[in-house]
Amino acid sequence: MKTINHLKQDQPDLTEYHLEPERSDSIPYANRDQARRGLPDQSDFYFSLEAGWQSSFHPTSRCWQDFHLPSGWESKQVFAHFQRVESAIGVWVNDQWAGSALGGNKRAEFNITNALQPGQNRIEVEFSSGVNCNPAIHLWAVAAIHLRDFRITTVPGDDASWEIIIQPVMRNLGTKLALNHRIETMLFDARGIPVWIGPLGVMVSIEAGAEISAAFSYRLKKARPWSPEDPYLYTLILEMRDADGTLLDLRSARVGFGQRT
């Protein structure tokens, strides 16, 4: 089984996915950001739908945009994420109902996987009247079994030690039980040197359609503190692998240890 033992230093050339130029372009946002920081590629990809919406005006406003499904997304779960919904909306993809949201300047997200088709697709959004029909949306794709979220907490000990607590949330959007999946993590200092030997992790099994959480921790004998004068940050890498060791999802985060009081 492969394990996390180093930070990836050299990044391959990143492929950009493009919509029609006069409408909008699309880039694998997460991967571009990771490349800038010298971190490993993440396993989910994004592209934005922000410009070039066409619209029609009735008692409600409806706008639509065509986009090309990137290669490799056919086997993934694809979501449409609205960064801010000002008013009530309804969403269709290829004339199939995807869902609705009430607004209130909140975020909204829809799983549009079952409505997609290879190649060209169309997303339509209907707004209540009086709303500017130019929504900011990005599409993102993940494996059916993936890391939904995670939380990192650092707690000072009585001596110079620190405890770092990792709390991942895993989701199974597939139709079968996911047995013996493993969550692994490593912490690297600013030079890319591992803080502990070998990946730290936990084994989980997730029912189809379920979401579960886990927690594990590690105590560091000492850590370089973060301060405004010395904003030192560590890098935490979190991986999810199936029973065969295949990498399903990967996330990263910067971690700081506060000054003791």
Image (cartoon, rainbow, N blue to C red):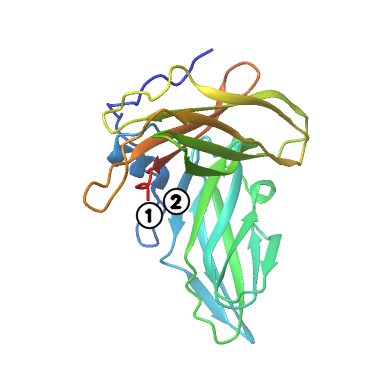
Q: Which residue is mark 1?
A: 25
Work out which residue is located at the far left of the displayed protein and give it: 229
Q: CA distance from mark 1 to mark 2?
A: 8 Å
Residue 252: percent from left, percent from top: 44, 38
Element under disc 1: loop
Where is residue 9, by image quadrant? Answer: top left
Q: Which residue is mark 2?
A: 47
Answer whether residue 19 is visible to the viewer in this image.
Answer: yes
**Left or right: 99 in relation to 66:** right
Answer whether residue 15 is visible to the viewer in this image.
Answer: no
For badge 2, the amino acid type reads Phe
Residues 56 and 126: in front is 126
Where is residue 4, by image quadrant? Answer: top left
100 lies above or below 227? below
28 lies above or below 88? above
Q: Residue at x 33, y 36 (%)?
A: 14
Where is residue 77, by image quadrant? Answer: top right
Residue 68: percent from left, percent from top: 49, 49
Q: Give the foreground label among 1 and 2.
A: 2
Q: What label does residue 204 carry, if any?
A: none
**Left or right: 133 in relation to 230:** right
Element under disc 2: strand
Residues 134 and 95: in front is 134
Residue 103: percent from left, percent from top: 61, 74
